[in-house]
Image (cartoon, rainbow, N blue to C red):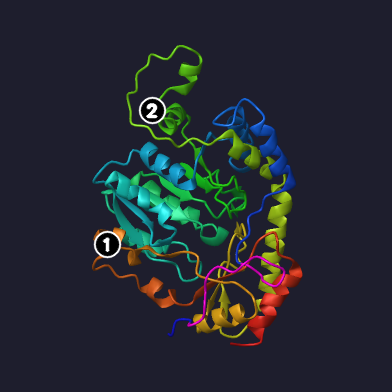
Amino acid sequence: MNKPVQDMSIMKANSENIVLFYPHVSELAKSSVMETLDSRWIGQGPKVKIFEENFSKKFASNLPAIAVGSGTDALHLSYILAGLKPGDEVIAPLFTCTATNIPFLYMGVKINFADVDINTMNMDINHVRQLMSDKVKAIICVHYGGLPCDMDELQTIANEYNIPIIEDAAHAVGAKYKGIDIGSISDFTMFSFQAIKHITTGDGGMLIIKNIDLIDKAERIRWFGIDRKSKQAGIWENDITEIGYKYQMTDIAAAMGIASLSEFDEQSQIRKSLFQVYEEELAGCARLRIIGSGYKDREHAAWLFTVIVEERYKLQEKLRDNNIESNQVHFRNDRYSIFKEFTDGKLFPNMDKIEDDYLVLPLHTKMTVEDVKRVCSVIKSGW
């Protein structure tokens, strides 16, 4: 397949262009930040705690929540809390943002990459089963685009080996699996508040933890290994007994998060409505298949709208010619040299089938129904 010859750099956001992503920052979020900047606390302070509590109440059945500086921070923290050690093995998705897997390189953990499911672009459950052994100490799953994985099947496998599941739910704020919120299911669940996610705090993350006994440790590791509550109470013994990191969230970021939570239902509905318009407009479109459509047992969070298309580059070029931005957002991790030791000689036939064929179309709260119909009209005119 020939690659595009024209410029495919990031498009400017203007009245003519429909861009792929656009951050959702409301007026309430802006005013909340300004109010925080005039307060005593702009680093980690009381608003971080409020954000944690509000987020957990809305998405995680009041399970303990730890707010951090990025989704990657939250993942690394979860891997530490899960007890992973150098030489341990994990099963993780081949197809994901590298943030899912890079923390394992910090830790000396061996990655067994699971192939992609060509119908969902989540992990292939059958391949996960094939990769299991007594050496595997955790399963990490990603809900691609906002469509939950088959959590029952994954949990069955995890239970057989008595190991935790860690959900990378960076795409999946507001998603549900069999009526249960993503965030309320597994041992650990990470959410991302990076610039273009459903909820943005500029950058940031949240880790939901089922085991309440791990919370004090999580809070120490988030802040250099210091017992911050004891230090602020004046009773800290001035000792650090475990390696910590600077992974805390600031009150400036939390102020954005609190405001965004109060408006989440409205902006989530916009995204889901646009997703549905795409589904309706592109249903039956020749040479194209929608990823994540038609599932009745799980609710899509509508972060990405992805299609599998013939001659993807030609369609991408045609969309570009019509001032519409599209792209492949995440890539197979075995293409990156940093993971070479885990992928040499390994075969991923499902990923091979679709790696040149998937394309992400614009979906964000700056778009209108008319914008979606414009994108679909260009597609339906052929390429």
**Residue named by callout 2:** 225
Question: Toward the viewer: 238 or 71?
Answer: 238
Whether pointer 2 and pointer 1 mark residues with C-beta atoms closer than 8 Å, the reply is no
Instruction: Inspect the image, locate mark 1, and give the three-letter code of the amino acid beneath it.
Output: Lys
**Numbered range of the magenta stretch:** 5-19
Tell me if I can see residue 56 in this picture: no
Q: Which residue is mark 1?
A: 340
Residue 157 visible (yes or no)? yes
Mark 2 and mark 1: Cα distance apart in space = 32 Å
Is 329 left, or right, of 273 in this rendering? Answer: left
Q: Quadrant of residue 52?
A: top right
Instruction: Determine the residue positioned at 49% across, 47% down.
Output: 71
Quarter of the rendering occupied by the N terminus: bottom left
Q: Quadrant of residue 111?
A: bottom left
Q: What kind of secondary structure does the magenta stretch mostly adopt?
A: loop
Packing grade of label 1 (10 A; few <14, some 14-19, many >=20) is few
